[in-house]
Amino acid sequence: MSRKYKINPRQNRFQDNYLPLIKKEMKSIVTILLCTAVLCSCGKQQQQQAAPSPAEAFVRVSGPDLLKPDGSKLFIRGTNPGNWLNPEGYMFGFRKTNSPEGINRMFCELVGPDFTAEFWKQFKDHYITREDIRFIASTGANTIRLPFHYKLFTDEDYMGLTAGQDGFARMDSVVRWCRDCGLYLIPDMHDAPGGQTGDNIDDSYGYPWLLESEASRQLFCDIWKKIAARYRDETVILGYDLINEPIAPHFENTEELNAKLAPLYKRVIRAIREVDANHIILIGGAQWNGNFKPLQNVSFDDDKLMYTCHRYGGEPTKEAIGRFIHFRDSVNRPMYMGEIGHNTDEWQAAFCQTMEENNIGYTFWPYKKKDGSSFVGIRQPEGWQAVIDFSEAPRTTFREIREARPDQAAARRAMLDFIEACKFQNCIPQNSYIRSLKLQAE
């Protein structure tokens, strides 16, 4: 027996008129609550990402020593991935064509600007990768000093780009790789605005104009301030190596230039400290990072400061680095050998022993180059000799360029083959070299 239910007219009006409104309002409330929850969550994540790292999370200075966050001593052992972000001719096998600008011009004369730009992009993509950083870490190294050109942080023409340079993208990658592999990183401005050295290694015009140009000095400080602001909370970065090997010993007014070095250092230190109070700042001596007399009685009024020297050749003895040890002891700050190398395995092993006994850490130069005397060697590809020959040929007139230029198709193939040869999987580990640095090799 079925029953018929009579619908209350009031209930019917409620369903028809009000229930849809209530459902709509409930949907709105739920939406608001969900949005609020998402915003709170995002805000919390942003707050976590933006939260500064505590001071004790960074490498710090304690007298002549570097201390890790856990308080144990850090003795730097590592390498420099040179040639990647600041090309040097000899690592390609070139001799006369040796600065970044000179190499770029030579390639453009050889194969044209468009192909050259594509070459540089692939070169930056493949010359140093995560696999290279993993290999460095596998040897027991703990630090990488990363040479870079200031133009990577401007809109100046450099390595195939005329605007929107990719310096931060490249450095971000290295920071990430070093973090994953447990390595410390020291960014090193190898080529400063105007040129700090006055030789091919700083891509300058044959004189250290940085020391005399106000515009260059200001740009130098601005770039370091921008870098420091980006990485102020990045604990993977050990410190900032301000300029590489300032003031070559070639000039009659060397002493006058030397006197301008400390004021420049003070100025850039102030700029960095406006945005970053966490990281160590590294200061090099004049004349290839070898002369610390211009800094002997200078107070930089900064408790996160250390010094960096360079050495090539000479006897691998304590006496050979005696002036570095003396200066280090006089200022009671750490001293570190940012560059050393290009010698026999026996010489390197002896010098590493000397540096270890005298508390001077080291990063050998370089990590990778054509042939050897590095962590890994690059095999010279077929056809590359024609590129070398063109780089050595007279090219002061357009007629000389035309007469020296080899077949362009063959030259392009050789350049692409060089990219393949420089990839980590195609490089040759130099095991005896690595072992000479007191590191581990297969």
Image (spheres, rainbow, N blue to C red):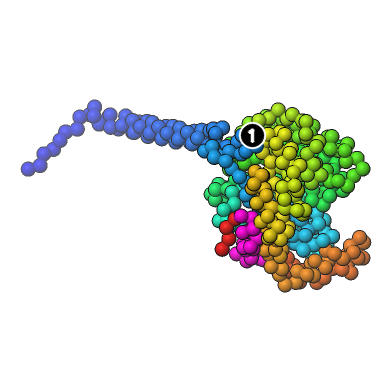
User: On the rendered structure, is 439 left or right of 371?
Assistant: left
Residue type beneath disc 1: Gly
Q: Quadrant of residue 117?
A: bottom right
Q: Nearer the viewer, residue 201 or 431?
A: 431
Q: Position of residue 256 (x, y in %)?
A: 88, 36
Q: Where are the magenta residues, as a range?
A: 420-438
Q: Residues within 10 Å of mark 1 (few under 14, many from 20)?
A: some
Q: Nearer the viewer, residue 98 or 355?
A: 355
**Viewer can see residue 153:** no
Give me the residue at 72% from left, 47% from top: 318
Q: Quadrant of residue 243?
A: top right
Type of secondary structure dominating the magenta stretch: helix
Q: Nearer the viewer, residue 294 or 423?
A: 294
Q: Quadrant of residue 378?
A: bottom right
Q: Position of residue 287 (x, y in %)?
A: 81, 44
- In magenta segment, residue 182: no
User: On the rendered structure, is 267 left or right of 13?
Assistant: right
Name the residue carrying label 1: 63
Which quarter of the image is occupied by the N terminus? top left
Q: Position of residue 19 (x, y in %)?
A: 31, 32
Give me the residue at 65% from left, 40% from top: 239
Vertically, is 31 above or below 117?
above
Tag count: 1
The secondary element bearing badge 1 is classed as loop
Give me the residue at 61% from left, 55% from top: 438
Which quarter of the image is occupied by the C terminus? bottom right
Give me the residue at 24% from left, 27% from top: 10
**Viewer can see residue 359:** yes
Vertically, is 176 above or below 348?
above
Q: Nearer the viewer, residue 289 or 137?
A: 289
